Image (tube, coloured by chain):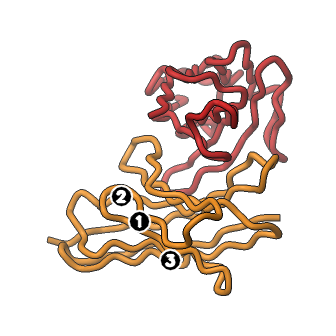
Amino acid sequence: AQSVTQLDSHVSVSEGTPVLLRCNYSSSYSPSLFWYVQHPNKGLQLLLKYTSAATLVKGINGFEAEFKKSETSFHLTKPSAHMSDAAEYFCVVGGIQGAQKLVFGQGTRLTINP
Amino acid sequence: GAVVSQHPSWVICKSGTSVKIECRSLDFQATTMFWYRQFPKQSLMLMATSNEGSKATYEQGVEKDKFLINHASLTLSTLTVTSAHPEDSSFYICSARAPPTSGRASYNEQFFGPGTRLTVL
């Protein structure tokens, strides 16, 4: 079985400061991992994905995440927060080949203070 | 990139009526589509997996007769909420997965629609 835990339900940072959104996963196999962002009343947008290639994954809008197998983590970071980054972020784990389902974390609401 | 649309984007209906939500993959053929439900300030919960030309696979606890799913073509899946009640009010999101041979998507990546806000009075 697969699961994912987002360690913070809410993160608040000041504009221009670094962002860290934490995610731990559990999987019996080498997983696919994703970070999605959802703005209010909008659908999901893929920020980045890990699919067993490079462990440091760069995504859109300056976000990146590092896959650490030893820590079963896939934390999302950004060096400098922007007001437009305020949104809900979901860490998602997908299965190995043949397993199509995605399992979503509980979400982390990111607030950016001026 | 791959685009998935949903229609309508929001709907208000009376209790006891049925509502149909459409999910379309606009520029690729989706052999598999997924339906999710999201309550306010909560995460997405998978309701069912829809495969073109076959019956949908429902997650545990999801009523098949209440949430009817039809995936009649490679670009369209529909979710019908039958005899809707206020507790069915939610944000419904679909996603579509392109076949691995399409060259368009990495394996296991799903492309999400913008969602449909259902309010049952």
**Same chain check for tags 1 and 3:** yes
Q: Would you identify the image quadrant in which residue B76 lies? A: top right
The amino acid sitting under disc 1 is Arg
Q: Residue A22 carries which label?
A: 3
Return the disc, 1 or 3, that comes first in the chain's sequence: 3
**Same chain check for tags 2 and 3:** yes
Secondary structure beneath label 2: strand
Closer to the observer: label 1 or label 3? 3
Secondary structure beneath label 3: loop
Closer to the observer: label 2 or label 3? 3
Return the disc, 2 or 3, that comes first in the chain's sequence: 3
Asked if residue B31 is positioned above or below residue A22 in the image, the reply reads above
Which chain identifier belongs to the red chain? B
Of B100 and A5, the residue lying toward us = B100
Q: Residue A87 carries which label?
A: 2
Residue ID at (75%, 36%): B49
Which chain is indicated by disc 2?
Answer: A
Q: Residue A109 carries which label?
A: 1
Asked if residue A83 is positioned above or below residue B103 in the image, the reply reads below
Return the disc, 2 or 1, that comes first in the chain's sequence: 2
Q: How many labels does the image show?
A: 3
Taking the image as shown, residue A24 lies to the left or right of residue A12, namely: right
Marks 2 and 1 in Cβ contact (< 8 Å): yes
x, y percent for residue B92: 57, 36
The amino acid sitting under disc 3 is Arg
In the picture, which quadrant includes the N terminus of chain A?
Answer: bottom right
**Same chain check for tags 2 and 1:** yes
Instruction: Give the drawing colour for chain A.
Output: orange
